[in-house]
Image (tube, rainbow, N blue to C red):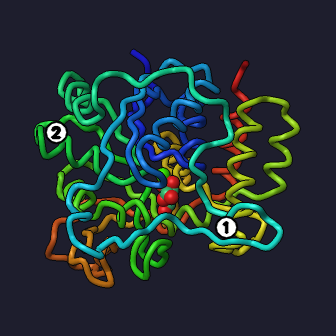
Amino acid sequence: MSDKRKIILDVDTGTDDAVAIMCAYLDPAIDLIGVCTVAGNKTLPFTTENTLRVKDLLKADFPVHKGCSVAMVSTLLPNRHGDYKGQRTQVEGMDKPIEIHTDYLELPPSVSKVEPEHAVWYYIDTLMKSDGDITLVPVGPLTNVAMAMRIEPEICGKIKEIVLMGGGRNRTNTSIAAEFNIWADPEAAQIVMDSGCPIRIVPLDATQRACINADETKYLRTLNNPVATAVADCVDHRILAYSHLQPMERLDSAPVHDALAVCAVAHPEVLKDVLFTRVDIDISGGFADGQTIVDPRAYTDRPRNAYFAMNSDRDLFASWMMDCVKRFQA
Ligand code: BDR
Ligand code: CA
């Protein structure tokens, strides 16, 4: 029996989701058994097409299942999410506004197709048939996973672990209080928090301390390997956008959030200062809508439900990413 970690990635591709898919496919410790798409960074047609483009670049054969196009309930409330379209800014001398995720990744249009089965049913069928050895790695809004849990709660007993990118305790990026993936579907996130599954959270507190920099993308470009170049393109795009929209301590660097969650699956030591704590989501619709509330008390009267990483090992993450892409053989 293989001792590779079987995972299903759930993505809203997205520049950092793209890197996450490439690394998950190329990490020899991971068996990427399927990829589900969800609306998030962009609408579902874009996140799905971008996912297929990455699959084609990798010449991979994992199935891609299209999932939910809208959050579970939050869009029903007027003004709750406004008309958020992602951060963007117009910079003098540039023909288009700068944004962290463009509609399409700069890769050739896809040739491969999505599977006929919806992502939610794929989760239910695959998990119910499994031996409880599948880890879910959602790196977008949690709509598909929560929907599957609502339809068939028994899947919760079949999930080995959920390693998710989302949330932040001391950091936010979408509202005064919230990180994007949780903010985009807060009810779904609370359903996952209440699922009873083992959960590891890779929040902004960890991902923003693991930025990839321009020296590293320059190195990737010397490898003369299409996957290394695609990773460099995604990261350089992020570096430019972050320098205008969310500057990091080192200006020529950017977080690649979703790839850190993948790294943490097989290399848990990449996460530092991990709290075992109680995490809930604010679903009140007020200023804190979508906030990840991390219980700071030593004594808590609520059952602890998640491991929450407050820091990460940047150098380990960067060298893991380089090692993954170097393995690609055209
Ligand atoms: C998360 O939001 C998305 O924009 C990224 O892909 C990442 O999953 C970071 O807040
Ligand atoms: Ca994402």
Name the secondary structure under disc 2: helix
Q: Amino acid at mark 1?
A: Tyr
Q: Position of 97 compared to 288: left or right?
A: right
Going from N to C along the chain, the mark reached first, 2 or 1, is 2
Q: Residue at x 74, y 63 (%)?
A: 240
Name the secondary structure under disc 1: helix
Q: Amino acid at mark 2?
A: Gly
Q: CA distance from mark 2 to mark 1?
A: 39 Å
Quadrant of the image occupied by residue 292:
bottom left
Q: Residue 174: percent from the left, percent from the top?
A: 46, 72
Please, is residue 40 above or below residue 127 in the view? below
Q: Residues within 10 Å of mark 2 (few under 14, many from 20)?
A: some
Q: Residue at x 30, y 60 (%)?
A: 185
Q: Nearer the viewer, residue 5 or 298?
A: 5
Q: Position of 195 compared to 92: left or right?
A: left
Residue under label 1, please give it.
242
Count of numbered marks: 2
Residue under label 2, please give it.
157
Please, is residue 168 above or below residue 230 in the view? below
